[in-house]
Image (cartoon, rainbow, N blue to C red):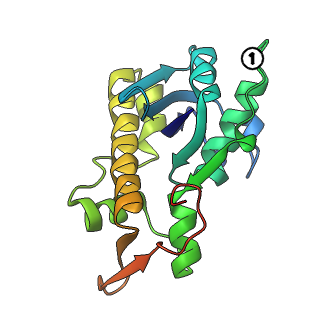
Amino acid sequence: MDTLVFDIETKNFFTDPGVGWNNFDALEVSMVCVYSYSKDKYFSFGENELAEAAELFDSGSLLVGFSINSYDIPVLNVHFGKLPGTKTDLWSKNRLDLLEEVEIALGRRISLDKLSRANLGIGKERKGFEAITLYKNGEIDELKKYCLQDVRLTKDLYDLYRTKGEFSVPDARTGEISKVNFKNAQSPALL
């Protein structure tokens, strides 16, 4: 079995007309990017390649991401459920949501950009809402690049999480850095 680090982008968002908050059925996937530890390889799947993405997810025993439990998994599960002959259920997989881990430890959320900058020295090159614009403008190569960058940052953070068991987290107002330790967490990634 495989550990998969992933991120998705959508063509629309909850705030778009006709969608509505938490209406995951109305969100349309534009890109899925994944890093496979067993294959040591990055993958990208466009909107018409979700069946291939589902095959890769079937091989995963641990799914890792940033805010995946509240966004990526609910969206993908809806779309995988619509594929003929596919029985992929992402909720049945072990999952590690790095944002949830930080939120549980600190009691507050942090962006992937700020967490990456504090721990990796690099951050995101674009904002999340820009992915929808990239798709609408037909800039699919840029969309793929953006999604893959999020996967790379998340993978590098996950590697720190596994090896060091802690993150440096900046305070949103003061910028003061505090350490968040996960060594006693019961996460499947640390057992």
Looking at the image, is 160 positioned above or below residue 57? below
Kind of residue indicated by mark 1: Leu
Residue at the (75%, 48%) spot, across then down: 20
Relative image position of residue 45 (x, y in whole percent): 49, 21
Drawn side of residue 71 relative to residue 116, left or right = right
Q: Residue furthest front?
A: 191
Q: Which residue is mark 1?
A: 83
Looking at the image, is 188 positioned above or below residue 61? below
Relative image position of residue 153 (x, y in whole percent): 34, 49
Q: Nearer the viewer, residue 7 or 14?
A: 7
Q: Nearer the viewer, residue 172 or 42?
A: 42
Drawn side of residue 133 relative to residue 156, left or right = right
Picture quarter with the N terminus = top right
Relative image position of residue 108 (x, y in whole percent): 53, 77
Relative image position of residue 55 (x, y in whole percent): 61, 19
Drawn side of residue 158 relative to residue 18, left or right = left
Rendering quarter of residue 111: bottom left
Q: Nearer the viewer, residue 33 or 10?
A: 33
Q: How many marks?
A: 1
Q: Decide if residue 172 is in sight here.
A: no
Q: Decide if residue 63 is in sight here.
A: yes
Q: SS at mark 1?
A: loop
Q: Residue furthest left?
A: 121
Drawn side of residue 55 relative to residue 116, left or right = right
Residue at the (68%, 42%) spot, across then down: 93
